[in-house]
Amino acid sequence: MFNHPLFYLLMCTFLLKSYSPKQEISDPHFFILCKGNNSGKPLLSPCPNCFVICFQSENDKEQAYWLLFCLWKSKTFYPYLRGSVIPFVILRDMKKCIQSGLDKSESNPEQFLKMVATFQSINQLENQLRQKLNTMNKAKMLIVYNFNSAGG
């Protein structure tokens, strides 16, 4: 009965559309990768194969960003991937998935905030470990460089 796309947009607190570099965006927004195995990944800067999602408030944007991050990390978008060579998610499926996640987060806000806090902590630890691994790789290269230049 209410399958018309305009009705669906009126019910949402966000606007999701294909990104175009020609279009200026002034509302709070972020980008979502829509092609490849990382489809659904939230991005702070645009890329050629992405959607843009706009919100009425910065708070809504922040909530949706972390929701999408959690959905992407849990591979929620995999069942929606289409295509045989380069997988992609279509706009309609992305909207459904985001709206479903937002509905769940609004029906149980305490659990959602707990989940987001846990993801943020894990993400911070992951970044710290990545920095340490980069430092260790540089140390290895320096050791080999010193060995090679020590004489021979």
Image (spheres, rainbow, N blue to C red):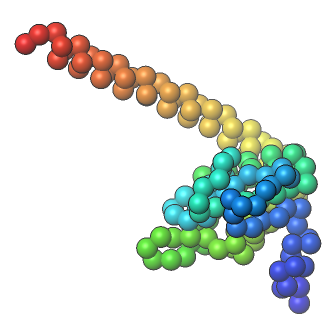
Looking at this view, is 53 or 19 the one in front?
19
Which quarter of the rendering shows the N terminus?
bottom right
Q: How many marks?
A: 0
Q: Is residue 19 left or right of residue 128?
A: right
In the image, residue 27 lies at what x, y percent?
86, 52
Q: Is residue 90 left or right of residue 113?
A: left
Relative vertical location of residue 34 with respect to residue 64 in this rendering, above or below: below
In the image, residue 39 lies at what x, y percent?
58, 62
Give the quadrant of residue 18: bottom right
In the image, residue 71 lies at what x, y percent?
67, 56
In the image, residue 87 lies at what x, y percent?
51, 70
Question: Residue pushed farthest left?
Answer: 152
Which quarter of the rendering shows the C terminus?
top left
Residue at the location (43% across, 28% down)?
Answer: 133
Relative vertical location of residue 17 with respect to residue 71 in this rendering, above or below: below
Residue at the location (23% across, 20% down)?
Answer: 144
Q: Is residue 137 left or right of residue 73?
A: left
Residue at the location (17% across, 17% down)?
Answer: 148
Looking at this view, is 85 or 130 the one in front?
85
Give the quadrant of residue 82: bottom right
Residue at the location (65% across, 53% down)?
Answer: 46
Residue 69 visible in this rendered orientation of the protein: yes
